[in-house]
Amino acid sequence: MIIYQGKLDDGRMVAVKQLSVNKSQQGESEFLSEVRMITSIQHKNLVRLIGCCSDGEQRLLVYEYMKNRSLDLIVYGKTETYLNWSTRFQIIIGVARGLQYLHEDSHVRIVHRDIKASNILLNEKFQPRIGDFGLARFFPEDQAYLSTTFAGTLGYTAPEYALRGELSEKADIYSFGVLVLEIISCRKNTDLTLPSEMQYLPEYAWKLYEKSRLIDLLDPRLCKEGVVEKDVLTVLHVALLCIQPHGSLRPPMSAVVALLTHKSESNGAPVRPAFLGRKRRPDEVPSRETVSEVLSSPPRSDSASFYQQSLSVLPSPQRSSSASFNKQHSIPALPSPQWSDSATFYRQQTPVLPSPKRTNSASFYQQAAIPIPVLPSPQRSHDSSSFARM
């Protein structure tokens, strides 16, 4: 896959994603999946498809141009761009709302399967858009999970999906939790150049949490900024809830958004992962066998009350999935951010797949059944100057 920056005849800048379908059937499958997926949904925190091209072996997807490119370039220190706390929180809550839409509010239930920093795109105001739907799956309404072959990115992958192929929204929620830890600490989830106890970010975060030193995970530059400690701890606590070892303990995204925006409070503590009780060699990175211990170990006895407490959420249409999450930790809450650009929701000019509306469709976007413009295949020998590799 190659991404180009392009310019349309009307002057609009676009990002052109080229898939190499001639090398394998996977490219063709991902192309069809991404077109079908992205044309059926629209939300301000999802990337917008402008057009596509299918000509011989050429497969192009044309998306809105995102000036600040992908989040990984900033989080992993590949650029000198610095994100202050309010911008980081804006990105976190934006991704959470995008996932809530995919899982609970869209007219079709969707699991992304590859939530990670490189798939979070940022516009000129650093507002996030979830991109790359090549691995996304439509999800049957009547199934708790799908048994499927693993696809995704190690380090962000939920243990039950990586080991047993059990795919559900809970896999995206786990990935979101890892992503939040990366955004706050401004480092990769796995970094073998660090001391052994710090190499695997989720494990390091849990150890700091148990020592009441979770704030040590914060990017040192944010400390100099003078952020409010309780605000950071609130978000970090939500991240720990999202990376619980058992999917049943992870909150649905509607609950995550409610916690982040002070529309709910929780009572209880995250469950300690089983791998933390095991000694590791200094050079050892958590393996599939290590993660298997987590899955085979039942929740600790002190988590029994975790299931008994209820989440208090302000009245709003909620799917049944949010009711299944029962107990969370008592934490200070952040004020809901004010969205100054709420009027800028994208209206995609794309067809809507025929699918029955859910009962809470009043909150959905009304999409217009307008065909996607099909762009001509770029002529390499003549107009290659109009495309610049990003």
Image: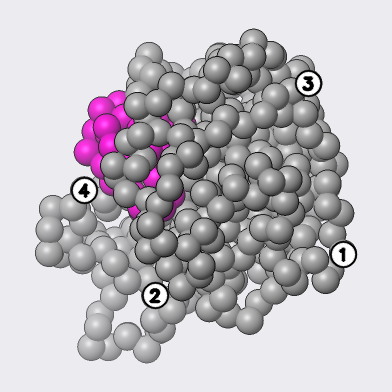
Q: Is residue 257 magenta?
A: no
Residue 274: x %, y % from top left: 46, 35
**Secondary structure state at the residue bearing disc 2:** strand
Of the pair 197 and 18, the residue shown nearer to us:
197
Name the residue carrying label 1: 226
**Between disc 3 and disc 4, whose residue precedes?**
4
Name the residue carrying label 4: 29
**Secondary structure state at the residue bearing disc 4:** helix
Provide the residue span drawn in magenta.
146-171
- Left/right of residue 209 with respect to residue 276 in the rendered view: right
Residue 26: x %, y % from top left: 18, 52
Alpha-carbon distance for marks 3 and 4? 41 Å
Residue occupying image coordinates x 35% and y 34%:
293
Q: Nearer the viewer, mark 2 or mark 3?
A: 3
- Left/right of residue 146 with respect to residue 98 in the rendered view: left
Q: Are marks 1 and 3 in contact (CB under 8 Å)?
A: no
**Between disc 2 and disc 4, whose residue precedes?**
2
- Left/right of residue 238 with respect to residue 176 in the rendered view: right
Name the residue carrying label 2: 4
**Between disc 1 and disc 3, whose residue precedes?**
1
Alpha-carbon distance for marks 1 and 2? 39 Å
Q: Is residue 156 magenta?
A: yes
Alpha-carbon distance for marks 1 and 3? 31 Å
Name the residue carrying label 3: 314
> With respect to residue 261, does 3 lie above or below?
below
Residue 160: name its quadrant.
Answer: top left
